[in-house]
C-alpha cells in the first residue's frame, strides 16, 4: 500500500491546493482589470455587498464573504480612508458598527461595475453557460458538504 501512495502526485489531486491555485489566478485577473479604479476585487465585493445590504456590520460582512474579521476590518479601513464607506454605531446595539456606502463609494462601485461585469461575462462566455452553471452548482454542493463536516 505504501509503495502505491508514492506514485500519487498530491499537488495535482489535492482539492484545497487546486482550488487555491485557481482562485488566486481568478483573483489576480479581476485585480488587474479593476486596477484603473483603484479597487481590488475583495474591496469591490465588499462595496457591492454593502450596497445590497444597505447597512451591514463587519462581522456580518465577514460571514457573507466568508472572510475573517481581520481581513474585513483591514479592507473596510482602506475603503473608509478613501471616503467610500462610513461606520456608524448601530442604533439597536451600541457595541456594533454598521457599514454604509457614501455617495463617493456608490460612484466608485458604479465605476467598477462595468469592468467587473465585462470579465464576468467573458469568463462565462468562454466556459459556456451550461458548464458555468454546473461549476457553480458544484461549488455550492462543496460548500454544503464542508459545512456538514464542520457540524460533526
Image (tube, rainbow, N blue to C red):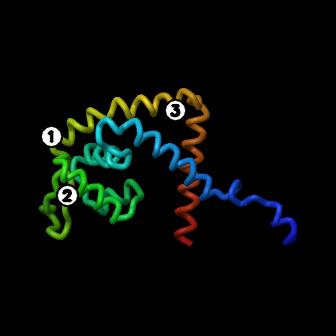
Is residue 139 shown left or right of residue 119? right
In this view, the mark in front (3 or 2):
3
Can you say whether 25 is above or below 132 in the image? below
Q: Residue at x 14, y 62 (%)?
A: 89
Side of 91 where 28 appears, left or right: right
Q: Earlier in the sequence, mark 2 or mark 1?
A: 2
Which residue is at the front of the view, 147 or 41?
Answer: 41
User: Above or below — where is 69 with respect to 112?
Assistant: below
Q: Earlier in the sequence, mark 3 or mark 2?
A: 2
Q: Which residue is mark 2?
A: 98
Q: Residues within 10 Å of mark 2 (few under 14, many from 20)?
A: many
Q: Would you place residue 149 above or below residue 108 in this image?
A: below
- How many residues crowd around disc 3 within 10 Å: few (fewer than 14), some, or many (20 or more)? some
Q: Closer to the camera, 50 or 77?
A: 77
The alpha-carbon separation of the residues under discs 3 and 2 comes to 34 Å
Quick one: SS at disc 2?
A: strand
Circle 1: is it few (<14), some (14-19), or many (20+) Cα within 10 Å?
Answer: few
Image vertical order of residue 136 relative to residue 71, above or below: above
Q: Separation of disc 3 and disc 1 at Cα? A: 30 Å
Residue with the mark numbered 1: 103
Residue 130 appears at what percent x and percent y?
60, 31
Residue at horizontal 70 percent and vertical 54 percent from the top: 12
Specify the quadrant that holds the N terminus: bottom right
Quadrant location, the C terminus: bottom right
Residue 63 left/right relative to 1: left
Residue 6 at what x, y percent from top left? 82, 66
CB within 8 Å, label 3 to label 2: no
In this figure, what is the number of numbered marks? 3
Determine the secondary structure under disc 1: helix
* Residue drawn at (52%, 70%) of the image: 151
Q: Secondary structure at mark 3?
A: helix
The tag on residue 123 is 3
Amino acid at each position: 500500500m505504501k509503495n502505491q501512495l508514492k506514485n500519487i502526485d498530491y499537488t495535482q489531486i489535492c482539492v484545497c491546493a487546486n482550488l487555491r491555485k485557481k482562485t488566486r489566478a481568478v483573483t489576480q485577473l479581476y485585480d488587474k482589470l479593476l486596477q484603473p479604479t483603484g479597487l481590488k476585487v475583495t474591496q469591490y465585493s465588499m462595496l457591492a455587498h454593502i450596497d445590497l445590504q444597505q447597512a451591514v456590520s463587519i462581522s456580518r460582512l465577514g460571514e457573507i464573504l466568508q472572510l475573517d474579521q481581520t481581513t474585513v476590518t483591514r479592507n473596510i479601513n482602506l475603503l473608509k480612508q478613501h471616503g467610500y464607506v462610513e461606520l456608524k454605531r448601530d442604533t439597536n446595539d451600541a457595541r456594533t458598527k454598521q457599514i454604509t456606502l457614501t455617495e463617493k463609494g456608490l460612484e466608485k462601485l458604479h465605476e467598477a461595475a462595468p469592468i467587473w461585469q465585462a470579465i464576468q461575462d467573458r469568463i462565462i462566455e468562454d466556459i459556456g453557460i451550461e458548464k458555468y452553471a454546473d461549476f457553480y452548482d458544484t461549488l455550492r454542493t462543496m460548500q454544503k458538504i464542508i459545512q456538514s463536516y464542520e457540524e460533526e
